Every structure is written in structure tokens, then in C-alpha cells.
Image (tube, rainbow, N blue to C red):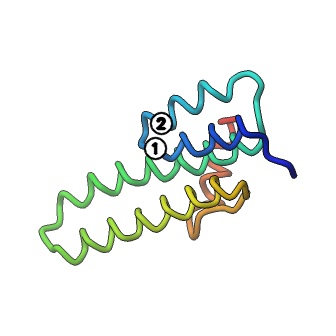
Amino acid sequence: METTGQAKTTAIVAYITIIGTIIAYFMNLEPKDRFASFHLRQAFGINITFYLIGALMGLFDQGFIVGAFYLFFIVLWGYGLVMAIKGEEREVPILGPLFQKWFSTIS
């Protein structure tokens, strides 16, 4: 599948915080691109996971647990961003297939 420059740009922007995901969503409204939509779902899932698990991390005072969470998040985020830059549709490890399923309405 050939990825257009606009779709790639939209996919990359999606990974730049939740604000970038929102901007990318509007960038992808017309025309809709399958590649950009794929990365929008991945980025949205990563951001939502970050905020939900981050809220739970407030209950822990252990640096190891919090550090492991941030490392997990950075790996997911970095993997998704690199795949967007390379123009590939690869799901992030562990949660990627769930993000595609849960957020299938984002297109």
C-alpha cells in the first residue's frame, strides 16, 4: 500500500499528545485515509491508556511501579510513532489489536 505524504503527516501528528490526536482526527476528515485512520486509533488508544493508567499510578508510591508504567508507555508511543514515520501499519505491542477493535468507529 502506498502511503501519501498527507496521510503520513496526519499519522505522525496523531502521536503528538492527545491534542495532536485531536488535530489529526480533523486533518483526516476529508478525504479519509485508511493509513491515517489506523494510526489515529493506535495513538488515541495509547493516549487514553496513558491517562487511565496514570490516574491509577497516583495510588502507588513505589518508584519501580511508576517507572515501569512510564517505560511501557514510552515503548508503545515510540513504536507507534516509528511505524507512522516508516509508513507501516503495524499495531503497537500487546494493546494494538484491542485499540483497533475498541476504536473502530474512528476512521
Residue 3 vertical position relative to residue 32 in the rendered view, above or below: below
Please provide percent x and percent y for residue 71. 36, 70
Residue 33: give its label: none
What residue does disc 1 label? Answer: 16
User: SS at mark 2?
Assistant: helix
Please provide percent x and percent y for residue 100. 66, 51
Residue 19 vertical position relative to residue 15 in the rendered view, above or below: above
Crowding at dot 1, Cα within 10 Å, few <14 / some 14-19 / many 20+, comes out as some
- Residue found farthest to the bottom: 64
- Say which quadrant the C terminus sits in: top right
92 and 20: which is toward the camera = 20
Looking at the rendered structure, the number of numbered marks drawn on it comes to 2
For the point 54% across and 40% down, the residue is 13
Q: CA distance from mark 2 to mark 1?
A: 5 Å
Q: Quadrant of residue 96?
A: bottom right
For the point 29% across and 55% down, the residue is 54
Q: Quadrant of residue 85?
A: bottom right
Q: Is residue 44 left or right of residue 62?
A: right
Q: Are marks 2 and 1 in contact (CB under 8 Å)?
A: yes
Which amino acid type corresponds to the residue marked 1 in the rendered image? Ile
For the point 73% across and 21% down, the residue is 30
Residue 20: give its label: 2
Which amino acid type corresponds to the residue marked 2 in the rendered image? Gly
- Residue found farthest to the right: 1
Please provide percent x and percent y for residue 81. 55, 56
65 and 90: which is toward the camera = 90
104 and 73: which is toward the camera = 73
User: SS at mark 1?
Assistant: loop
- Residue found farthest to the front: 5
For the point 32% across and 65% down, the residue is 70
